[in-house]
Every structure is written in C-alpha cells, then in structure tokens.
Image (spheres, coloured by chain):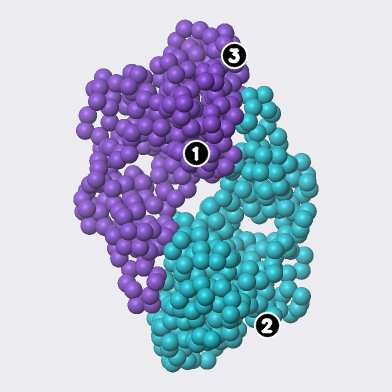
Chain colours: A cyan, B purple
Amino acid sequence: MSNPPHLTFDPDKPGTSKGHLVVPKGADCEALSLPVFSLNKGDGPRLLITGGCHGNELEGPLVAQRLIAWLPEAQICGRIIIVPVLNPPAVQAFSRNTPIDGLNLNRVFPGRAEGSLTERIADAVSRLLLPMADTVFDLHSFGPIWDFPPSTTTHPIADPALMIKTIRMAEAFKLPMTLVWDHPDTPGMFDISAHNQGKVFVCVELGGGIIGDEALAIYDAGVRNALISLGVVEGKAEYPTFRRRRSGQTLHTRRPADELKSPLPGIFEPRCSMLGEVKQGDLIGILHPMDSSSANSSDIRSPGPSIVCGVRSGGYVEVGEWLALLARPLNR
Amino acid sequence: MSNPPHLTFDPDKPGTSKGHLVVPKGADCEALSLPVFSLNKGDGPRLLITGGCHGNELEGPLVAQRLIAWLPEAQICGRIIIVPVLNPPAVQAFSRNTPIDGLNLNRVFPGRAEGSLTERIADAVSRLLLPMADTVFDLHSFGPIWDFPPSTTTHPIADPALMIKTIRMAEAFKLPMTLVWDHPDTPGMFDISAHNQGKVFVCVELGGGIIGDEALAIYDAGVRNALISLGVVEGKAEYPTFRRRRSGQTLHTRRPADELKSPLPGIFEPRCSMLGEVKQGDLIGILHPMDSSSANSSDIRSPGPSIVCGVRSGGYVEVGEWLALLARPLNR
C-alpha cells in the first residue's frame, strides 16, 4: 500500500502557511499534490474553503486565490484553510468530472483510500481537511446553460439544529437567493459527508462557470459577508447589487413538483425572469420543435403560484430535460 | 446516383410558401429535409436568411422563426427565403459540427454532391438557394466562452466594390460592432462561396449560443434594421440598447498582431471591457497557473493602442489559445 494522504506543512503554525495535500498514487495515476493555504490567527472559527470540485466551475478557484491575497491583512481571529482547486485534473480538462476515471468528485464522498483518483481525493479531503473545520464553504458555479441567481444552497438536513445553523450561515452571504434544495441526487455529495460529521456546510452557486467581472465581484462580496458574520474579519455586510437590486430571499424547492421538464424535443426559449413570481398558467418558456416546417411551438406554463429560481438559458433539449426550477418562500 | 437536391415547393409563388430543401441520401445517412420558407412580395431585393449552420448557436433559428411570424404582414416588396436550421443533426446534438461526419458546415462550402452529409448540405444550399438571392444574412452566435459584442462581420473581400457594398449592408444592422475580420481560417466558409458568386453576405454574430432575452431582442432589432435599409419593410432603423449604450462602430482586426494568445496554461481572468479602448501595456487579463502553491499569476497586457473587440469569458486555457481579439477603427 502507498503512503496515506498527508499535508506537506503544519496548518497549526501561526500566520500564513502554504504547502500541499498529497493524494496518494493508485493504479490509475501518480500521487497528486493539491495546493493548500492555512491562514491562522489563533482562537476563533475553524473554516475550510474549497473551490474547483467541478473542473468547469472556475469562479471558485479565483475567489479562493483572491482570499489568499487579501485575508492575511484583514483576518482578526480563527483559522481558515483554503484549497483553491480540489480537482486539478478536472480543471485542466475544463470538465465537470475527472477525466482519468470519469467520476464526479461531488458524488463519491467520503471517498475510498484504495479507490480511483476521484475517490482518493475525496478520501484525503474527508480524512485530513474536514476534521480541521467547523464550517465549510464549497465554491461552485451553476454553469452556463442555466440562468440562476447568485445563491447559497443547502439540502434539507435531518438534524433540525444543524439545519437552522446552516440556513443562518447560508443567509449570511446576503446573496440574492438562499435555497433549501430537495435535490434528487445527493448520495456521495461533499455536504452530506460534512453534515454527518456535524459541520455547517454551505454550497455557493454562482456564475456561469466562465468568468465574468460582475459574477466575481458578487462572489467576493458574498464570501466577505459570510466572513464578517463569522467574526473573522471586520466590516459591514451588505447585499451586493445584482441586476440593479440589492436584496435576498430564502426559498425552498421540492421534488418532483418544482422541477419543470421538457415534454418534447426542441429549442427552448425562456420567457420568464429569474426570481420572478409566476401564477398558475403563466408562461415559463416556449419549445420550438424545428424539425418540420409545419410543427407548432408549445408553451410551457407554471403549474401553480411559484417563484422562478432558475431557468434553462435556452438551447436544444430532449424529452425529460429540466427547463425550470420553481420554489416558494421557506416555511420556517 | 440518388436524386439531386431539390425543393418540395415553388418559392416563386406569390405570398408565403413553405416546404423543404431535400438533401439527398448518401453512404452515411438517409435524405434530410430542411424546412424552408419563401416570403414573396414580388419585385425588389432577393434575400436569403439562414440560421443553425452551427448546432450550438440557437439564437439564429429562433430569430428566423420570429421573422416567419411577423414578416408576412410587414413585408412590402422583394422575396425572402428563410432556412431557420441549415444543419438539423448538429442542432439536435447541440454541437458545432455535424455528429454524423464530424465536419463543420462552415468549412466545407461549396460542398460536394457525392460527399458526406455536411458536404451534401453545403452543395444543396450552394446550388439551389444561393443562386436565388442577391444578399445573404447568415445568423450565428459567438458562443458562450467569449465576451463579444452583438456584431456583423465580414472577411476582407478582394473585389473593392463588393467589399464596400458588404460593409454598408453590415453597418445597416446598427449593431454595436461591425467587424472586418482578417480571419486565419476561411477556406470552405459559406461567405467565401457567396462572394465568389458576387453576393453581398453578412454574418451576424450575436449572443452566447444559449438564448437570453436581451440577446434575442438585439438580434431582432438588428435584422429589422437591415430589412428597413433594404426597403423590404417600412420603419425607422435605430441602434438597439446594449449595456446601456446605443451606438455602433466599424472596426478592423488583422492577424496575427491582433490575436492575443496564452503564453502558459492556467485559469484566465478577463480584466478589460469589451469595446473598451486600451493603450500599450494596459491590462487585458490575468493568467492564474493554479498547479502549485508557489506559482505566480501573469498579467496579459495590450501590445499597442487598440479597441478590445472580444475577450475570453474566463476559463482554463492551454498555451496558444486565444485570450482576446483586438482591433482598430476601419481605415476606409
């Protein structure tokens, strides 16, 4: 058996330290070294911030790099461990999944020490980094094929006390949407592993996966707001401006009723506004079949009063693909 | 030999007619029927409008569909033939190239009657549709990985009279940018074929390839402006609002000096504004290596005074990938 995963430096050392998390080699590839930074100002919150779980979501790694630049001056207490890129081979391939084994890192937690590369990364993170933190911010992007507001998300958590703490932490980012997402595909997710260890885990979903100035500025502001609320930096938390509004709302989406899917193949043209309210029968979008000069377009309408929390940005869809995700205010 | 390509209807019939352009079967697949519409109001300009050349550029097909809905009422003269989707298998695969033979339709013109599917589509379009028009609007999208203004483009044309007519037609869309593009890879392009037949050909490049409301509205306005300038519909042409500005400029980009390429692999973070002026040494973006905790980021700077006509939206880039395209006002 190869060496177990390890850190090349002591993250308990005061001040800023850097080194690598070494993921051991396996049958499929050599050992991998993930750059890791520890910003240690003593007692206080113990935070882990990760980016680059999916290789085609690159706002997270850049926001993490910016934190490494400005936090050492600003931080007043606590320890923040930052891993800008959890999955370097996926980032280098600009691909959601790891090219070497085809696996989605966010579906293999807590990982396997003797598994393929993606499972070994998850195992190293679960065993070495997760125990060092009370709170985790995992920086994702929602991706280019959806119009989705800058948001923090959590899945429903069985433990009510942890659920309340997690929602409060998610709301502290002051992003346009805080979403409790009853997601159909949670086994193996990083947050489920973290919740099982009693951690507060917030997934930040922001930007198109390809980097724009506005998205990065909102991402920066959201993470700064969360750090202010934890007390590790000083300042005043404020809602960032998004599409000329400065506000946030906390929503809940339930399955399967809130998942609008395509009844036929065609080009989807969205016709609703993200975070807009819709009544029963309101137009969500139009499906254009395109395969015959006599085919008619179909209207896609809301099944009931809802808030649109995300809509496909338009594109060719097959039967059963998601067109929109609806939600309503969280009933606390 | 199979039947030659043919139309299933008579496009010379007055009023609105619809049918199909039949692309003959070949060794690789059965015959293909492309929906075609003819809007015929007698004497006047003879126009061909095409969309869906690349299957992941879907604004064009929707704008074409909208034209079919509003033009029959508004058109006062001339004949407009509309093909919303030139390459249906590519649209169904949401892929730039045709999945059946892997070819880019916009690199195989004028096509081959006995070639693979993509070549047979080009041959049918070149032989049947192109001779019916004096002017062609080919509706593309620039795609999601670039920040690129709504624009009309043309390559340099050897015939000075056709070049002047083409630039005037391109400017008539009144989009934020009209670009004369000295492109490195023009053999087999649709416009080159059309220029060789003496046609005015304007390529419209707009939107991210995934459909948003703002992009569609600007696209609609641009095509309407061009139709007004041709005299086939009545109305007043106006610059559409784009990022709060209503204006347009005509630029010229030359190779290789105006193509900024990546000197190393990493995550590219754009730091300049599309259509913004830059001086020599101004920051275009930052490259973040990400593969080591000690690697430094590199600034990418402008080699000279220029206007930024497009910039990578950010993402992982390899050595030699384009990061930005610069230009300067066209010297007439």
Residue B278: % across, % down: 27, 51
* Between B221 and A196, the one nearer to me in the picture: A196
Image position of B328 with respect to A244: above or below:
above
Contact, mark 1 vs mark 3 (Cβ under 8 Å): no
Separation of disc 1 and disc 3 at Cα? 29 Å
* Between B68 and B25, the one nearer to me in the picture: B25
Image position of A218 with respect to A288: above or below:
below
Q: Residue at x 76, y 59 (%)?
A: A254
Residue A195 appears left or right of B303: right
Residue A45 appears left or right of A166: left
Q: Quadrant of the N terminus of chain A?
A: bottom right
Judging by the rendered image, the residue that carries numbered circle 1 is: B101
Chain assignment, label 1: B
Q: Residue at x 54, y 21 (%)?
A: B2
Disc marking residue B9: 3
- Of labels 3 and 2, the one closer to you: 3
Residue B21 placement: quadrant: top right
> In the rendered structure, which amino acid carries the disc numbered 1?
Asp
* Between B161 and B33, the one nearer to me in the picture: B33
Q: Residues within 10 Å of mark 2 (few under 14, many from 20)?
A: few
Residue B91: % across, % down: 56, 38
Residue A45 appears left or right of A199: left
Disc marking residue A198: 2
- Of labels 1 and 2, the one closer to you: 1
> In the rendered structure, which amino acid carries the disc numbered 3?
Phe
Image position of A134 with respect to A186: above or below:
below
Q: Residue at x 76, y 68 (%)?
A: A332
Separation of disc 3 and disc 2 at Cα? 69 Å
SS at circle 2: loop
